[in-house]
Amino acid sequence: MTVPSDRPFRIALVAFPGVRAFDVSVITEVWGVDRTDRGVPAFELRRVASEPASVPLRGGLSLTPDRTLSWLSRADLIVVPGLDDHVTPAPDPVLEALCRAHDRGTAIAALCGGAFTLAQAGLLDGRRAVTHWNLTELLKARHPGVTVVRDALFLHDGNIWTSAGTAAGIDLCLHLVRATQGAEAAATIARSMVTAPFRTGTQAQFIEHPTPHADRDADALAQARAYALTRLAEPHTVTGLAARAGMSARTFARRFQATTGTTPMRWLITQRIAAAQKLLERTDLALPEVARRAGFGSEVTMRQHFAAHLATSPRDYRLAFHGRGSRREVDTPAPGP
């Protein structure tokens, strides 16, 4: 997605009868609240529908559009909410407008069952997509041309983004803010919403606790994570972190993944990337020093991880996002909501 420099970032919320009120609220909370006084860039969120008439939502609610589908040609990002009935057919004008937007190269994101809407439009044929774990078989059956991924919170294929259910929609929205406006803006919005600022898309959709051990070990695992976070510049191994938790490396790795949905080393890499993003946004430190403080050891290693996880370089990331958030000392705690 190209980030405009001379105007607010434009987001279109596509509404039609049957979309979920929860997802509409999530989209509105992320992009529809003015947080420019806290360093978040300005957004222009528009509620777009086929007609200007009120759109009924479940529970006696309704949504009043402020633009028609023609506004999609001006949007930088289009977001499709999930559905109350996951096989609700979208109106033909909506499907046609989404196809035209896709052909223009506009980024399109679908939350939860919104993947069914994109599939109806044919936009997911030959692509990887994710939806709520309980709907994966239905999506496969109704749209066999889609490669449905079960164990992911969100993912993208080309200019199409899809997410799993409910909370994963929040994760995807915050990730899209992070990708277009930087980690500091996403973290500020997350603090305001009192939600986790960063969950990777590859994390498991749900975490099972098959035995009481998971609860008994929770504090030990949390302490090991806290230890690593306060010492990111130091090298860490699974064996070393396991010792901090009082477990064998094998037990630690197994219970870490059962608790967090990811492996210890993948979790550590995501935390180091997040730390480097903040340093690049907030400070003028040289890239080798950013790499050292974030725990990558070398600028080359940091560059490799940025390319793999963010599809950009540390230098380009700084050029795009440096100074957008509030400038404060790195070690100063961030303010609350």
Image: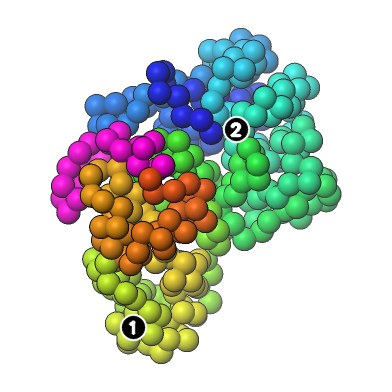
Q: Is residue 75 visible?
A: yes
Residue 65 image label: none
Residue 194 at x, y = what percent? 33, 45
Is residue 176 in the magenta section? no
Binning the other alpha carbons within 10 Å of mark 2 as few (below 14), some (14 to 19) or many (20 upward) gives many
**Alpha-carbon distance for marks 2 and 1?**
42 Å
Q: Is residue 318 shown in magenta?
A: yes
Above or below: residue 264 compared with residue 337 = below
Range of residues picked out in magenta? 316-337
Image point (24%, 27%), residue name = 37
Disc ID at residue 240: 1
Left or right of 182 on screen, residue 82: right
Label 1 sits on a secondary structure element that is helix
Question: Which residue corresponds to the image point at 58% horizontal and 28% vertical from the top-left?
Answer: 78
Residue at numbered disc 2: 107
Task: Name the amino acid, label 1.
Answer: Gly
